[in-house]
Image (cartoon, rainbow, N blue to C red):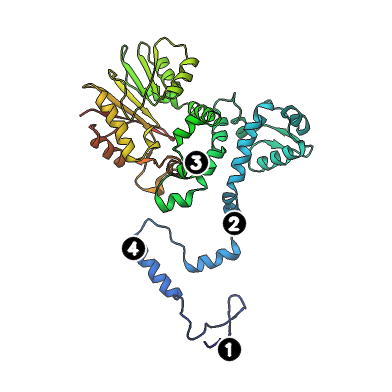
Amino acid sequence: MRRANSSDATTSKRTGRRRHPPATDAPLLPSHRDNHDATTALRGSLPNLNFVSGAAIADMATARPRQIRKLRALVRGMAVSQMLGTACEIGLPDAIKPYQAVAIESVAGILGVNSDALWRMSRTLASFGVFAVDGQRRIAHNDLSLLLRQTGVPSQHWAARFWSEPAAWSAWMELPHVLRSGKEGFVKAHGKHFFDYMNDCDDAASTYRQYMASGYPGRHEIVAASLRLSPGNVVIDVGGNTGALMRAIASHHVGIRGVVYDQSETIRLAETACNQDNLEFVPGNFFEKVPDGGDVYVLSYILHDWPDEQALQILRSCRAAMKPGARLVIVERVLHDDPTRCDPYDLLLDMNMLVLHQGHERTAEQFDALMTQSGFTPIRVRKRHSAFCVAEASVL
C-alpha cells in the first residue's frame, strides 16, 4: 500500500497544521458533504431527533470541558451513590443537628469511625451539594443533607440505603446479561427472584420495606385524597406492604374499612406495628387469589415490578374477586409515548424495573392493553403528579 508522500501534504488555513492525504488504496471515509447529505435525509425522516454534525464532533475533542466534566460526574456516579448510602448507614445525617456546624472529629467519635476518612467523604459530598463543610474541618447540614435524616420530613434516608445495597448493585453489574437476554439481572446475580431473595434476607428486606413505606414524599396522602369513597366502602390494598397507604386512606375517609393484603411475613410485621380497628391484615399470594367483597381494589406500584405475563395474572386475580360496580385503582408512573418528553428519572426507574424484576414502567397504551386482556375498561387518569398518576378502571 502506498504511503502518503510528504510532498503531498497541504497546510490547513484554519489550524496551520499539516494535512496528509490517505493512502490511495485505503478505503475512504465518507466526505463531509456525504455526511451532510445523509444527515439531512435522516432529519427529514426523523424530525424529532437532534443530530450532531461530523464537524461538531471534531470540535468537541478540544473545546468541551464542561461536557467532559458532566460526563465524568455521570461515570463516577456510583461513588456518589455509595457515599450517600454509607453516610446514612453509619448515621451521619442524624448525628448532626440542623443548622449547627460540628467538628468532624466530634462526629467521628460519636459514630465510631475514622475521622480522616469521614472528613474526606464529607468534603466530597459537600462538593456535590450534600452537606456543607469549611476550612476548620467542620460539617453542617444544608437543604439536601437534611433530606437524608430519618426524622426528616420528607426523608430520602431509606432510598439512599436501598440503592446502595449490595443486592441492588450486584444486579446492575449483570446489565450486559440483561441487554443480551431481556431478562432481569437480579436472578443472574443471586440465583433467585427479587422478592424470594427479600424473603430470605432479613437485613435487605428490612431496608426495602422501610424504603417502600417512606415512598415518595406525600404520595400516600395525595392518593388518599384523590379516591372517591363513601362510608361503609371496603378498600383492599393488594400488595399493601406495611399498610402505610391504607392508613392514609383510612385517616382521610372516615367510615371505610381497609384490608391490607400481602405475603405472610410482611403481613405479620405490618399487623404488629398497627393498632387501627378499621384495618384488617390478610396474608396471601396475589398471583393465586385476592380477597373478594371489596368496593375498591388498589394496586400501588405493583404492576411495574412484573413483566406483562405476571402483571396479567395479578389483574385477573383482582378481576375474579371483584363484584359488579367495583373499581380498580392503579398508582403508577404513566410514561409519555414520546421518550423525549419523559422525565429522565422515570426512564431510569424503568431501567431499574428491568434490571431488578424484568418489569417496566408503562405508557397509557400499554396499560390499556393489560386492562382489556384482563376484563377491565381502559384506564382513566384521576390525578396526575410529577412522580405518579392515580388511574381507575372498571370491570367489564
Q: Quadrant of the C terminus?
A: top left
Could you say whether the residue bearing mark 4 is in a helix, strand or loop? helix
Spatial distance from mark 3 to mark 4, Cα to Cα? 47 Å
Position of residue 48 measured from the top left corner of the image (x, y, whole percent): 37, 55
- Residue type at numbered disc 3: His
**Residue receiving disc 1:** 5
Tell me where residue 109 appears, x and y as whole percent: 76, 29
Categorize mark 4 by other alpha carbons within 10 Å: few (<14), some (14-19), many (20+).
few
Q: Secondary structure at mark 1?
A: loop
User: How far separated are the C-alphas under marks 2 and 4?
Assistant: 30 Å
Question: From the viewer's perspective, is the residue at label 4 or at label 1 nearer?
Answer: 1
The dot on residue 44 is 4
> Residue 192: x, y in percent?
45, 38
> How many residues crowd mark 1 within 10 Å: few (<14), some (14–19), many (20+)?
few
Q: CA distance from mark 1 to mark 3?
A: 59 Å
Q: Kindly identify the residue that appears in the image at 61 percent across and 43 percent down.
A: 80
Of label 4 and label 1, which has the lower sequence position?
1
Residue at position x 68%, y 43% from top?
124
Nearer to us of marks 3 and 4 is 3
Is residue 275 among the parts visible in the rendering?
A: yes
Q: Earlier in the sequence, mark 3 or mark 4?
A: 4
Residue under pointer 3: 190
Of badges 2 and 3, the one in the foreground is 3
Quarter of the image for residue 30 reads: bottom left
Label annotation for residue 68:
2
